[in-house]
Amino acid sequence: MELYSVWLLLPFLYIAGMLISKSQKPSYYATYNCFAIAILFVLLLFLYPFNQPMESVVTIANHGPFHISFTMDLLAWITSVFCLIVWFFSSLYSVHYFSKNEQQNIKRYQLFSLLNLMCVLFIFNADNWVTFFIFFELLLVVSYVLIIHYQKPDTYAAGLRYVFFQIIGGLFFLSTIMILYSLLGTTAFVPGGYAILSESSFFIVLFWGFVIAFAVKAGLFPVHIWLPEAHPVAPSPASALLSGMVIKTGVFGIMRMAIETFGISNLVGNMSVTVLLLIAIFTMFWGSAIAIGQSHIKRMLAYSSVSQMGYIVMGTMLLSPIAILGALLHMLAHSIVKSLLFMSAGTMIHQAETTDVTAYSGYGYRSPIVFGAFTIGALSMIGFPLFANFITKWALGVGAVEAIQLEYIEPWLGSIAIGILLLSSILNALYYLPIIIQGWFHVPQPENGDSFGSARPIPVIRYKTPVTVTVTMIVLAVIIVAYGIYPDPIINICRDILTSLTPTNSCPSLF
């Protein structure tokens, strides 16, 4: 518990240290963040719940409904691990990305990056809805600064839209936990949930209050409108954080709601669950379909993220053990894959000086490491074997079959879920594969004095990739491949999470 208290305190100390720093070196603040995150990661490894005699709990305040408390259970631990991985490599990537920016902007960005990290970690570690809500709302403020970093009219417009939607979601969230507290006298998370809520006349109000609040943050259809506008204008390291982790707090909230507030067994057969499942399935299809028509590469990736949030919510609302396992696996895998895609796309934009998805012909020859990383991320998103998302989509498909067998859903609904899961992967291929094919198999476009019309062959001018970017691309790509080839450690941890949080205490093997 003492180590856990230190771990929770460190982000505050890091933020204070950055505030008082007066360094003039452009790379100082990104390096500072990397060092700080590395320490948090090492300490987190020692906080692995199975190494502790009991769950670590830290209570800051406990005055009636104002209960601020944190718990390091296995779900908080694994999500925090992936959160720190994403933040470390985003910070490492930003060392070069912001090398030409004004010094004050760099310090501001890195400071608010740390604030975002603190909020996300505290959301993952919250053990009640009040604590969750406080940092969920603070996350709105600090992530807004990342979106408007460049301070241009289009960034302010995207930031304003983000704030507008998040405030509406926050109001729904606050109203919901007020009703929840009035009914239960607590907002604490409980494995198996509260059976009394399924019989309450306020069930629909509570369920959809939570769903709307979290759907806005996650970018779920139809409250996703802010997300495709924010990514094209935000810095690429910020896009990696927004898509990799910030929107995950929304689907994470839906998981907590289903498992530890209402309870899986209490949601089976409920019409509201069916409606949300249908919305999630449509989101899977719609996000991928709209992404096909996008010419801006970051907008394409943004719509892809909308679709992927549908995957996670679908898995959760299928309610079967393997489906929920697949949702959790997909959430973790997507955090790494989409972070790599946004950062590799950011480098492609800077080096090729274009955002057009049709303008990267021959890019693989000019920058093989960056485009190789983009290719691995794209193939994983499509669901190719040996990559992370193949495992997660397999689990979601098997989970849909299991939900039909357990009679949690009607066969027609399960069939639609499986069909859209496959169709969405095909749609993913339709917008990722053309970029990959152009990059590796088309002739590079003339640039910087190239003269491909000459009778003599002209050597391809290669882009120089900084060491920090190279390390980021390679390590994240290796993680994605390792996740796909040897997923057993992650699967076992996620299975242990579900068996500890569900009353049935069972989660069948995937293979």
Image (cartoon, grey):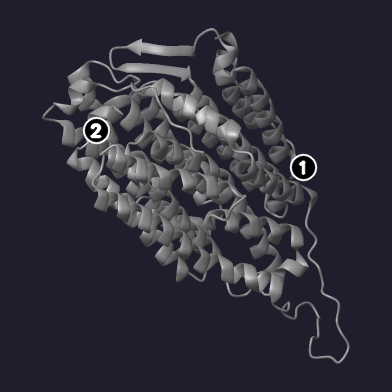
Image position of 219 with respect to 260: above or below? below
Q: State the residue in front, 196 or 3.
A: 196
What residue is disc 1 on? Answer: 25
Q: Residues within 10 Å of mark 1 (few under 14, many from 20)?
A: few
**Disc 2/disc 1 C-alpha distance (Å):** 55 Å
85 is higher (above) or lower (below) than 11 = below
- For the point 35% across and 55% down, the residue is 283
As drawn, 200 above or below 390: above
Of the residues shown, which amino acid type is indicated by label 2?
Answer: Leu
Residue 228: x and y in percent read: 44, 58
Quadrant that contains the N terminus: top right
Q: Which residue is mark 2?
A: 267
Q: Which disc, if any, is residue 484? A: none
Say which element carries label 2: helix
Q: Amino acid at mark 1?
A: Lys
Residue 356 place in picture, x, y as percent: 57, 72
